[in-house]
Image (tube, grey):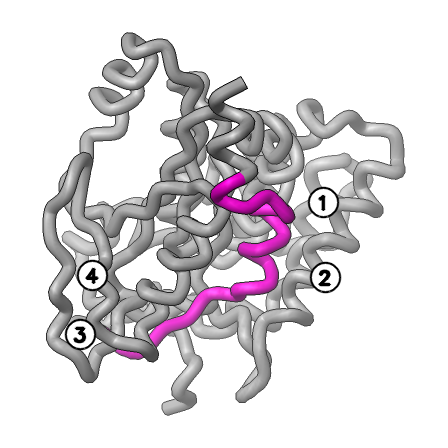
Amino acid sequence: MNTQEGKTYTLRAGASGSECYYSSIHSLADELLRNGTGISGLLERVREGSRNRRKLNRILSRNPDGSAEGALAHLLRERFSQYTGNTKSHLSGLSIRERLDRTLSTIEAQYHFFMLEIELVNRANLEAFRRCDVRLAFLPHCLHDLSADCRSARRGEDYVCKGCSKICNINAVSRLLRRHGVVPYIWRSANLASLFRKLRKQGHTVGVLGIACIPELVNGMRTCAKAGVPATGIPLDANRCARWWGEFLPNSVNIPELESILGKETLVDSRLRRDR
């Protein structure tokens, strides 16, 4: 098995990184927005387009019919099907019970719409996220070093990395986030709605950055949107956790893309801004 293979999607091209994927998704968003549709209007279209699986399958079973919805669905498949080649074989192997799980049963066309949705949400929320005086990040446990005995421990709102492995991706990401004034948690038990209410009662503005597989990241971003919290995030390079495979497999996330979301601000700069 390719060491970078995901159960349904893989953003890394062979042994290389996911830079080609991010270049493609950035370019497509630029192209669509240049056509005159505002980002909020386009985001609404993308969310609506991903909603009905049967309708999506019908649209993609024929040539584009001239509708904006059909044209977008076909364009997304043309640009991003190379990253979702395992989806059909995964779906064919699901049990009846697993088919009821909306995450596990995400169809290929939905992945393509979700990819664009993540990009648009990042663009819409980036400046608001950076201005928040409390910025939290929620990281997936599946990024940890599988060769080490993870020593993460509960502290504050959820589990935090203790830096026990120098080659652990959670350790590297956590260190980067802290340098930019973002508090990183390994998401296991935090109740976001309760956490948002508590921080707002304390007078804080709250922003969230998430890292997760594509369908779960979209779900998290939508949850934050309903709560009025500016969310940003990037998907894991592939879905390789026990939920998909029955065991944890090594995984990664694109660090330069994460840095582009965080910007140039340092932890010291962040503290000075909050103290003004």
Looking at the picture, which amino acid does disc 1 mark?
A: Leu
Q: Secondary structure at mark 4?
A: loop
Marked residue nearer the N-terminal end (2 or 3): 2
Residue at 31% x, 77% y is 166
- Residue at mark 4: 162
6 shown above or below 74:
below
For the residue labelled by badge 1, is the local secondary structure a helix, a strand or a loop? Answer: helix
Measuring from the top left, give residue 261's x and y in whole percent. 59, 47
Q: Which residue has dot 3 on it?
A: 247
**Among the two numbered marks 3 and 4 on one chain, the one whose residue lies closer to the N terminus:** 4
Q: Along the line of sight, which residue is nearer the eye, 119 or 141?
A: 141
For residue 257, side relative to residue 144 (left or right) = right
Q: Which quadrant: the N terminus?
A: bottom left
Query: Which of the two residues, 168 or 98, is positioned nearer the viewer here?
Result: 168
Q: Residue furthest bottom?
A: 1
Earlier sequence position, callout 1 versus callout 2: 2
Residue at mark 3 to residue at mark 4: CA–CA distance: 23 Å
